[in-house]
Amino acid sequence: MSLNWKEINLILAELDLPGYQIQKAVQPAYDVLSLQLYGKGAARNILICLTPGACRIHETFRGVPKSDRPLRFAEFLKSRIVNGWILEAEQLGDNRIVRLVIKLGQNRFRLYARLWSNAANVVVTDEDGLVLDAMRRLPKRGEVTGGHYEPETALAGGATVIEGTKRELPIREYAIREFAPEIDAARSFNEKIDAYYAEHGGALSLEALQTQARRSFEGRMGRLAASLERLREKAGNFEAAERLKQYGDIIMANLSSIKTGDSWLEADDFYAAGSSTEGSIRIKLDPRKSPAAQGEVYYEQYRKAKNGLADVQGEIAAGERELAGLETTLAKLLEETNPLALHRALGVKPGRQGALAMADSKRPGLSFRRKDWLIIVGRDASENDELLRRHVKGNDLWLHARDYPGSYVFIKQRAGKTVPLDILLDAGNLAIFYSKGRNNGEGDLFYTPVKFLRRAKNGPKGLVIPAQEKNLHVKVEEVRLKELEQCRIEKQVK
């Protein structure tokens, strides 16, 4: 549940924010903001949360983790209000809109925290109400850069309710509720609020986040376990490959008994001599082949099964490692007691499952994040094959240098987006640079969606044949490569 106006007033009264300097602005998630303050001989960490059903402002006594990558609104606050001094901190009437007046040098800014569950936002304006930026950009409300936001004007006209709020009739009487009764009564209201929302903060509560973690990881673990079961069954079939070689030997030993057009060979099974299965065996033949070619059919099947067994065993080992890693990660997440840290670990955006950092660390090859696009480079046949099997999907774009051996480069598809030319050139530069043709300084490459690739029959690991490919000529740009190096994702070392 969100805070009511009386509770917000009590929180602000306890904090007594005027006279504090804003030293840091941290945005651990898209709907959470932390202002780290110092003044009057003490440090405070003010949390503003816009999560539906848990909108609030209060002091937090828990660590606030940084986002994996800088978020837009936090970067804006760093440039405009960080190092500024809070001159005023009050709620506008009973409307659950908190206004901070901040002075930085000769400039004054207003930071509004609107704590409505159906339309929460944080808006920063100048003294005239010109919107400089908003945590959630809402064009229809004018809450975008260049818009106008000045809720005080409604109150100045004598209104007790700012336009846009919803009231039920009759008007509800609000009271300060009892939060976290298990905490010592001598503790401040802010401390009780912080403790309460850690456990009951809606989508940001510890219980809800742990449920999200279980749902995300247990679903993936279940699918992975089912895949491993199918692979083990396939390995069991491959393990019978030795019998195929025996069939070929029996056929070659009985060539004189086979005529072109025969569908079966019935002969003594000399491999079963002395065993309980000793006796004759019936082996299926291909009537279109000559007697001499019949044994080669089974030898070829034996070779494929033997090679396939090695690949499947490798996949099983990789799958078992991944499953063990997921189990370990889930256990660590469930041990986390800070809901903000757990929220960050589960993903940058609310509701987004999985941790980007964990995915990056698991992915083979090199990864680059450029303007919200993910580009992946496989550096050898094993990495190319692993990326194709486990880390790319049908609509992801595949690039490869023409006429030269080299890396597979993939551009991960974004929903509803077309790969821009600039990103295509980034990937093309990487494809040429990580190929045998790098010294030429330029080269041709082809690209196509992953769904149009097919594995070469009996070819080496990772070898694919593209269809519907397009051609692109790329000149290697040193400046572009240096910029990409700055966007390279460093894998976490455990």
Image: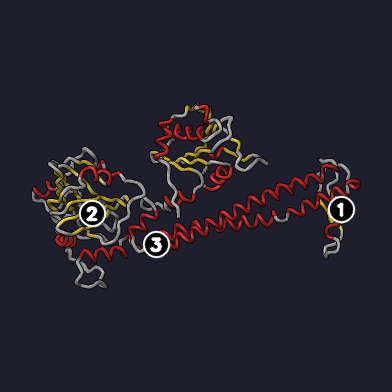
Kindly report the distance in space between the C-alpha atoms of the residues bearing marks 1 and 3.
Answer: 63 Å
N-term-proximal mark, 1 vs 3? 3
Q: Quadrant of the C terminus?
A: bottom left
Residue 210, label in figure: 3
Compare residues 446 and 128 and report the one nearer the observer.
Answer: 446
Rendered location of residue 77, percent (x, y): 24, 45
Compare residues 161 and 146 and report the one nearer the observer.
Answer: 146
Please give the residue where the numbered disc 2 appears in the rendered image.
36
Q: Quadrant of the N terminus?
A: bottom left
N-term-proximal mark, 3 vs 2? 2
Residue 266, label in figure: 1
Q: Is residue 26 left or right of residue 264?
A: left
Q: Is residue 198 left or right of residue 188?
A: right
Which dot, 1 or 2, sits closer to the camera? 2
Q: Sort mark 3 into few (<14), some (14-19) or many (20+) by Cα contacts within 10 Å.
A: many
* Three-letter amino acid code of the residue under disc 3: Gln
Q: Sort mark 2 into few (<14), some (14-19) or many (20+) by Cα contacts within 10 Å.
A: many
Rendered location of residue 63, percent (x, y): 30, 59
The image quarter containing residue 332 is: bottom left
